[in-house]
Amino acid sequence: MAELQWLGVLRHGQSTGNVLAQDAEVSGLEVIDIPERDADVPLSDLGREQAAAVNRWLRGMPGDDRPDVAVVSPYLRTLQTAEVALDGTGIRAVRDERLRDRELGILDLLTAYGVEARLPTEAARRKRLGKFYYRPPGGESWADVALRLRSLLRDVREEHPGGRVLLVAHEAVVLLVRYLVEGLTEPELLAIARDTTMANCAVSSWRAEGGVLRPERFNAVDHLRREGTPATRQEDVNAEPV
């Protein structure tokens, strides 16, 4: 990644699915009652406010610090976040399916309690294999997502040498981009995942120093606080077993 000047990852704003997932987990329900498919879950009203705060942050950047291009997940909540956040900034947006959220297959729409109650064999298999390598039937492991992100980051490096690139994506993507850029080990990544709940519209970024991308910020929400916008920290649309 030495050819990039700056790389940032923006998690989408709060979605209606985040709210419903949080309510289902707190209520001890087995299933999250989301009417749309995952790709069609929209932002909540608060999510739009969060994206607007990102817009003001981007507009306030000096021109030579502002991203040149934003690469955006094709899911509705990320597209809506990018639409609001990039409005009037002059930052060009392109979609890339490799930034989509992790696909959970048979676990889709189940809470952590629901997985234990309805799919105890899968819960046990995941516990044995670990979060990074467990692949639910019909879904993806974290390792699978990392593979598609390796491909995306390689293309971004080659297409935007010396550039400043912002990715607009999902919780798992943010963590796995950090894993790839910083060369973390599996235990290091999982320790970060255990200790961190990614905030909606949080920014993580890396800046080139000596030909290498160095960490600049992680899960930062100061741009939201400056605007008086709440920094929500719900899990993404699909809850996973702990």
Image (tube, grey):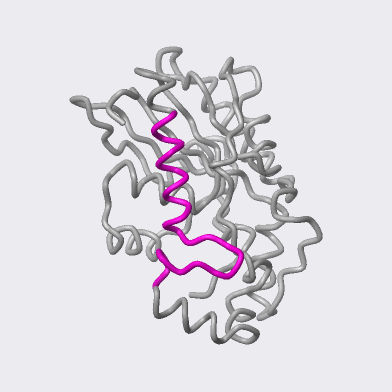
Quadrant hosting residue 52: top right
- What residue is shown at x 40% (from left), y 13% (from top)? 64
x then y, percent, for residue 226: 51, 36
Q: Is residue 16 magenta?
A: no
Between residues 182 and 65, which one lies in front from this camera angle?
182
Locate the N terminus by quadrant: top left
Q: Is residue 134 above or below residue 116?
A: above
- What residue is shown at x 41% (from left), y 35% (from top)? 153
x then y, percent, for residue 240: 55, 69
Q: Is residue 134 above or below residue 44?
A: below
Q: Is residue 143 magenta?
A: yes
Q: Is residue 162 above or below residue 234?
A: above
Q: Is residue 6 left or right of residue 167?
A: left
x then y, percent, for residue 55: 59, 28
The stretch in magenta equals 130-155
Quadrant hosting residue 104: bottom right
Q: Is residue 105 above or below residue 68?
A: below
- What residue is shown at x 66% (from left), y 66% (from top)? 108
> What is the total number of numbered labels drawn onto the structure image?
0
Q: Is residue 50 left or right of residue 242?
A: right
